[in-house]
Each structure stands twice: as C-alpha cells, then as structure tokens.
Amino acid sequence: MSAPRRVARRRTTRLAGILAVATALVVSTVACGQEGGGKDEQARELLPPSEVDTSNGLVIDGELVADKELWEAAQGQVVKLYSGTGKEAEDLTAARFKQETGLDIELTRLPTNKLAERVLSEQGAGKLGADIARVTDPRVAREFSEQGVFVPYTTPFDQLLREQNTGVRDTYLNCYYFVNAMGYNDAIIEEDQPTQWEDLVDPKYAGKLGVVAVTTGGTLNALAHFQISTLGREFLEQQGRQNPRIFDSTSTEVDALARGEISVASLSFNNAFAAELTGAPLELVIPDKGVSASENLMGITANGLQNPAAQVFMNWTMSKSGQSFAAAQGFVPARTDMEPVKAGGKYQLPQADSPQFHLFSEEDYEKYAARDEEWWKQAFDYMG
C-alpha cells in the first residue's frame, strides 16, 4: 500500500472513531431522558443479576445484607448520597442498587473539594442534606469525621473488613479503590500500541501525551507517587519534556483522548472505561509494573442513621454484590475474599492483595503528598 493511501486509511479510521464517539454521546443523551436514565440495562449488562431473597430480610447471593427489621423499615425511603465519585459510576451504582433492593438514591455529585465546601457549610448551618457522603481524599474524610459530619456505623461485614485491612475507621470506611493506569486512542494508534509506562516517554508521542494535573485531587497524588517510587523522579521529567497537554480534570482528559486531540495518556481507569462503554475509540492498558490506587472513602451522617435505606446502602456497598459491581465498573474492591471480576468482562485489574496494586495510603498522603506535588510541578513546569 502506498504512503498516501496508508495516511488516507488512518485518517478515515480516526474520523470513523470520532464519529462513533459523537453518535454514542447522542445516544447516551437520549437515553438519559428515559426511565432510569438509560442505566438500568447497562448495569445488567456489566454484571449478571444477583440472586435476591427478601423472605426474611435482604439476602443477596446468600449473604445477609439487612435483617428483617431494617429491611422492612427501609421500604419507601430514599438514600440521599453526596459523592465526589464520577456521576457515570454513581448513576450505574444507583441503578444496580435499585435492581437489587427496590430503593432509590438521590444523588448530589460534585468534585471532592467543592463537595467538602458544601458539606461543611451545610453542617455548620445545621442543614446537612446528605445521608451518606463519598470523597476521594482522606484529608477531607478525616475533617468530616472531626467536624461531626461522619458518625460511627458498623456494617454486618465489619469484622471481616478489619481482618482484611480494607481501611475501616471508626466513622468511615474505604468502600473500593480508584485506579490510575494508561490508555490510548485505538483509532489513531493502530500499530505498535503502548503497553508499558515507559512508552509514555517515547519520542513518537511528543505533543500527543495527556496528563491530569497533580493538584486535581487525591487520585493524582497517588499516581504521582507511584510513578516516582516505581519509575523514578526522572520519569516525571521525561514526561514533562514530551510537551504534554495538561488537564484540570480526568473527565476532560478522557474526552480529549476520545476525540483524538491527544493519542495516549495516563488516566483514571474507571472514567476511561465508562467512555469506552459509550463507544469511544479507547483501549486501556494495565502495565506489568502495576497501577496506582487510592481509597474511595464513605461515611454515614446523623441523618443517615435515622434513614434505614441509607443503612441498607452502606451494607450493600460492602457486600459481595456491591463490591462485585464496583469491580465490573473498573474499580478495585476493598474486599479480597471474592473471585476477581473483570471490568465489563474485558479488563482484569490487579486485586488489592496483588504486588501490582500500589496503594497510596492515608499515611503516605501525610508523608509524601506535598513533596510529590512540588516535584511534579517542577517536572511539568506547572504553575496551577
């Protein structure tokens, strides 16, 4: 095939991929106007339905999630969830939760820093609207605990979770892990695709690399520390010399990758996987050296203690059913006593007890976050 014809074919393929994204976004927008926001069927496709028994409480796949008294009290109640997790993930979670319990979730979704401002303001005014809050930064979770936003609550799985060292605190817990890995636009990169972290600094990707600023939040602190500790500080500097495009959110980075504005990126696995599900021309990569991970922290409020449905949601989230559904969406479960679940039946992320799983713990935040952030800014000549 001649060079002009090869170029033409690549351009045609790329255009087809971009048009597929646009079409998928239109379909997604239309679906949002349908009952359940179009998520009900997608949730079922991600993971086969569980076996639910409500004859004596709520039992899912043989595991007691709520006793009879709590289950009966929860009927007709709505869970008010404030979350810093991505809206796509929470909408799917709400759909799955309703499928298995019949209970609804009312979602308020904001980035964790904005969510913290709102929660603390409402708490200070005595008008907190949340039953449950999820945040992506352990410093925010600790402040919520200190300010009385989070109150003690014990799920039926508390002893098991503590034995597995999943991150249970007195007033909040780690419900699952966020993971950062790699991805590329497979409508652009059709041959010799990237497979390892080191590929991000290949000169052929100069000007085509995407990264998210470390100042964006806890998951990016985790990624920076993983890259420094595993690949060396110089790896950040090599990326900086690639003339990368720096984004201020994971969602805008994934959108740019899907549109072909960049061709390769380090990225939030769940966010990119959600885009792939809508038809974006993305392929995700789990390098041999592993992935970075950080906690998704969840706690119940005083309001939630008065709402049986909120207690059911806390319990369900930590059940095998809730944990498996998180895995199906591209998160890593906190629990390690389960069979691995592939994201969408395609990608197998390292489990929490795997040597490829590199957790940035709350203690690591205290020790390294400020230093890593400064090194990252220097490497990328970033002033934000």
Image (cartoon, helix red, strand yellow):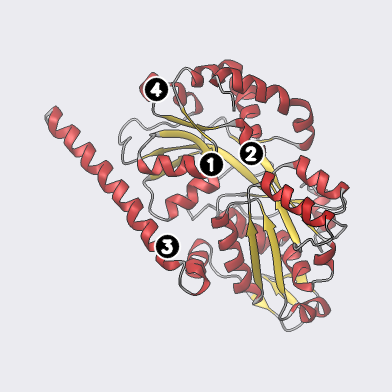
Q: Which mark is residue 206?
A: 4
Residue 329 in the image, given as x and y percentages of width and height: 55, 54
Q: Is residue 245 left or right of residue 15?
A: right
Local secondary structure at mark 2: helix
Q: Position of residue 325 (x, y in %)?
A: 60, 59
Distance (Cα) linking label 1 and label 2 = 10 Å
Viewer-proximal residue, 194 or 79? 79
Dot 3 amino acid type: Thr
- Quarter the N terminus occupies: top left
Percent of width and height locating residue 71: 77, 78
Q: Which label is found at residue 278? A: none
Which residue is disc 2 drawn over? 219
Q: Secondary structure at mark 1?
A: helix
Q: Counting residues from the N terminus, which is met first, the one under dot 2 or under dot 4?
A: 4
Q: Earlier in the sequence, mark 3 or mark 1?
A: 3
**What residue do we see at 77% from left, 37% from top?**
362
Residue linked to disc 1: 250
User: In terms of image quadrants, where is residue 15?
Assistant: top left
Mark sitting earlier along the chain (1/2): 2
Residue bearing the label numbered 3:
29
Q: Quadrant of residue 207?
A: top left
